[in-house]
Amino acid sequence: MTLTRFWFLIVSLFILLLALFLLYPRLFCRSKPPKPCTGSEPRLKLPLWDGGGIFMTRLHLGDETRAIPFEVAVDTGSNILIVSGPNCSHCDRNDGVWNMSIGSNISCGVQSTIRFVGGQVTNYLWWRALLLDYSPDLRSGKEVEFGVITSSSSRDGDPLNVLGLQGLSTNELFGGGPVFLDSLCGEKTVLFDFSGGHLYIGHVNDLLPPSVNPILMTIPSFGIAFTMANITRMSIDGQMNPPSLTPRFAIFDTGSTQTLVSPDLSHLLSGHHQVTLWFERSSPSHNDNTFSITFTSPPGSVSSSSLPIGSSLLLGNIWLRQYTLVLKYNTREILMY
């Protein structure tokens, strides 16, 4: 083999690898699997507050020498963690900006678009850093992967102001990406103590009252990160709803302020009402296999919308905050008390 032919093969191989990287970047930058659980993982306790309709929490991301605080919206209708980037002109600059010089081992440098109900965000997939458990003074934590927002837009293409997002569901969004809860060892359970102002991630059984009836969780299998439960019956102000006006599913979405229903049901829920929903129990008793939850419907808290899942009722945080909400993804149970 001549020297010229040798270098021609080397250059050709380099061009082929570069083309594969550009076309199929995830072949070269796969996410690392989460570290094995030790069986005694600490519970994560984070602050929880109402940030003008959307519930927020505070995270610290960085490495052993430096951490950045982020204020992010908590959303059970998403499954990933995304934070503001330095070049995102429509990100909320008060919620924390990721410093690209921290955690230089970027997992995957390609861009991805994540779509949601109100619009979309574009981010780099994916950075890797430590989620420091309690404060930036604690120089240890869990390694998590997250996206850095570079731009955002509404459905009609106009600029959309966005917050950082902490997704607390476990199945895939349309955009894909590393699932936040999958990177944390221990139980995949989240507890929203809305009145007490705390968000717990991990084992929570010692925080629960002695007797709580769990609702059977239904996780959709068609690519939307919604946490749902089957509705068996529904009443409004003590009057049973006919089956034709009773949604099949309830979507538990802390990332939404409104409660969304189909147009034919919205006029029944306008104004102030008492709404009772019956759900399937995860462990049916010999007397009854359903469990009911009653919500107060504040005026203006219900909107009509075409939902991505037909015949469903999306429960926004204005309704959910009336209870303590527990989502147990390992056992597929929802508790409200």
Image (cartoon, grey):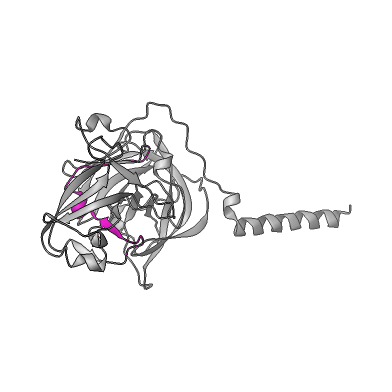
**How far across and how far down the image is residue 310, in percent?**
34, 62
Q: Is residue 237 left or right of residue 142?
A: left
Horizontal and vertical percent for residue 278?
22, 48
Give the image quarter of residue 214: top left
The part of the image, by quadrant, that contains residue 235 is bottom left
Is residue 322 rendered magenta in the image?
yes
Number of marks drawn: 0
Where residue 145 appears, as percent x and y from the top left, is: 44, 45
- Residue 308 in the magenta stretch? The answer is yes
**Range covered by the magenta-colored residues:** 307-330
- The residue depicted at 38 percent of the width and 33 percent of the height is 186
The residue nearer to you, when weighing 184 against 263, is: 263
Q: Residue at x 23, y 45 (%)?
A: 48
Nearer to us in this view, 329 or 94? 329
Which quadrant is the C terminus positioned in? top left
Return the residue found at the far front.
287
Q: Is residue 68 above or below residue 43?
A: below
> In which quadrant of the rendered view does residue 205 lie?
top left
In this image, 41 relative to 241: left or right? right
Q: Is residue 273 visible?
A: yes
Q: Residue at x 26, y 35 (%)?
A: 285
Residue 64 visible to an observer of this rendering = no
Q: Residue furthest right?
A: 1
* Camera-side residue of 87 and 293: 293
Residue 1, image x, y percentages: 89, 52
